[in-house]
Image (cartoon, helix red, strand yellow):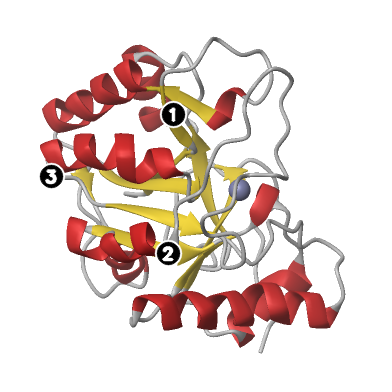
Amino acid sequence: MNGISILMYHQVGNFPTVKLHRASYTNLVHFRRQMAFLKRWGANVLTMTEAVAALRGERPIPPRAVVLTFDDGYRSFIDTAVPVLQEYGFPAIVYVLASKAGDDAGWYAVDGQPTPPLMTWDEVRRLPALGMEVGSHGLFHTALKGVDAPTLRAELADSKRIIEDQLGRAVPHFCYPFGSVDQAAIDACAAAGYSSAVTCQRGAAYPALDLLALPRKSIRQGHDIPMLLWKLYTKNGLKGAPLHRSAA
Ligand SMILES: [Zn+2]
């Protein structure tokens, strides 16, 4: 059965080779090659909204279906990744932090690396017109596993409302910070009214999975085209048990 490869990116730019957090960096030269490859390969790059419709069975899942996701809302998304995406006509979704627009990624400290800046609201508001979707990554980049109900409500429902107010449009998609998720978090995600949420669990997305716990495939620094192709064709089975909301 056809699945959808949801690829996970963070920062795109020019970085020294790192040993830690290799999933946080994609060098521009690699990113450009990856997008050119997806075009040649005939990837059907879907918006997350289109992917959700396909996973719900409202439209067919096309062959070679891919969704491009970018976590955290780095300024490098609009400055560096978006121009390349536009060159290839690819949509993407970026997950922003509702309480950290214009701030920097302070949760993220890597030896010797500057703390990267996050987009301002003015920048985030420009994205829909550039063909990009904006999702929520919560308020403060909080790991949601095991936190209390008020924190879950704030991170899920309040972040959604804040971003919707800033954009003047619905924000139906969520991304769990650090991929940290448990059943209570998934249930809170449902209660907040999201229609999709992505994790860091590895695998392709299939209709049988809960739309609020969709797996992704992480693209790491130094991944060349054979590695990307290998990730697209393999790594489709879910690594670990499927996560899902409580039965209604
Ligand atoms: Zn993140």
The amino acid sitting under disc 3 is: Gly
The amino acid sitting under disc 2 is: Trp
Residue 234: assigned label: 1
Mark earlier in primary sequence (1, 3): 3
Residue that extends furthest to the top in the rendered view of this protein: 17
Visible residue check, residue 246: no
Q: Regarding mark 1 in the picture, which secondary structure is present there?
A: loop
Q: Regarding mark 3 in the picture, which secondary structure is present there?
A: loop
Residue 89: assigned label: 3
**Residue 156 position by quadrant:** bottom right
Q: Is mark 2 within 8 Å of ligand 1?
A: no
Q: Quadrant of the C terminus?
A: bottom right
The crowd level at tag 2 (other Cα within 10 Å; few <14, some 14-19, many 20+) is some
The residue lying at 50 percent from left, 32 percent from top is: 235
Q: Is residue 35 above or below residue 57?
A: above
Picture coordinates of residue 123, whole percent (x, y)? 35, 57
The amino acid sitting under disc 1 is: Thr
Visible residue check, residue 56: yes
Residue that extends furthest to the bottom in the rendered view of this protein: 248
The crowd level at tag 3 (other Cα within 10 Å; few <14, some 14-19, many 20+) is some
Residue 121: assigned label: 2
Picture coordinates of residue 81, whole percent (x, y)? 31, 37
Mark earlier in primary sequence (1, 2): 2
Give the Cα separation between the discs numbered 1 and 3.
25 Å
The residue lying at 71 percent from left, 81 percent from top is: 153
The answer to whether the residues at label 3 and label 2 have Cβ atoms under 8 Å apart is: no
Picture coordinates of residue 72, whole percent (x, y)? 54, 49
Query: How many numbered marks appear?
Result: 3
Mark earlier in primary sequence (3, 2): 3
Q: Is residue 71 above or below residue 136?
A: above
Picture coordinates of residue 107, whole percent (x, y)? 73, 45
